[in-house]
Amino acid sequence: MDNRARESIVAVFRPVYWVLRWLVIVLNKILFGWLYLIWQIKGDAAFADDIRTNLYFLFPAGEIVKERWYRLLPFDYVSVRVNYQNACFSFARGAGAA
């Protein structure tokens, strides 16, 4: 197959590929976005309990900050902020592959 034929095939299929890719991304967010958000909220709550248990010395004076908007972190990461007196500590953990 010569280069002109290959370029013309790519030129035909490239817009189709981009439209299908966009549709898959949008459908994924519509169909499964709520589920990802629930998993993120549960993971953050479990991590906050771990922080409260293991870093007990922060907690009569410290408080966990409730986020106004939940954001989906990649790769099963969880994040928690703790306000302690006049400092703000941000803790993050990646779950990784189990």
Image (spheres, rainbow, N blue to C red):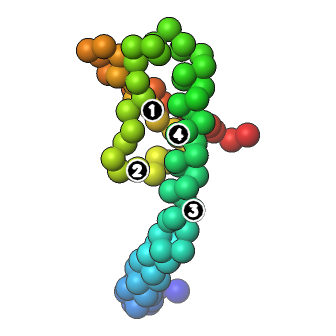
- Return the x and y of residue 96 as percentages of the image width and height: 63, 39
Mark-to-mark CA distance, 2 and 3: 13 Å
Q: Secondary structure at mark 4?
A: helix
**Which amino acid lies under the numbered mark 2 shown in the image of this protein?**
Arg
The residue mark sitting in front, 2 or 4, is: 4
- Return the x and y of residue 65 as percentages of the image width and height: 38, 33
**Local crowd at mark 2 within 10 Å, few (<14), some, or many (≥20)?**
few
Residue 30 vs residue 86, the one in the foreground = 86
Q: Secondary structure at mark 2?
A: loop
- Return the x and y of residue 21 as percentages of the image width and height: 46, 77
Could you tell me which residue is drawn at 39 percent across and 14 percent down? 61
C-beta proximity under 8 Å, tags 4 and 3:
no
Mark-to-mark CA distance, 1 and 4: 7 Å
Q: Earlier in the sequence, mark 1 or mark 4?
A: 4
Residue that badge 4 annotates: 44
As drawn, which residue projects farthest toward the left? 86
- Position of 73 with respect to 35 (left or right) is left
Q: Is residue 54 visible?
A: yes
Q: Is residue 89 visible?
A: no
**Which amino acid lies under the numbered mark 4 shown in the image of this protein?**
Asp
Q: Quadrant of residue 36?
A: bottom right
- Return the x and y of residue 6 as percentages of the image width and height: 45, 84
Where does the C terminus fall, quadrant-wise? top right
Residue that badge 3 annotates: 35
**Which amino acid lies under the numbered mark 3 shown in the image of this protein?**
Leu
Please, is residue 69 above or below residue 43 in the view? below
Residue that badge 1 annotates: 80
Residue that badge 2 annotates: 71
Please, is residue 57 above or below residue 38 in the view? above
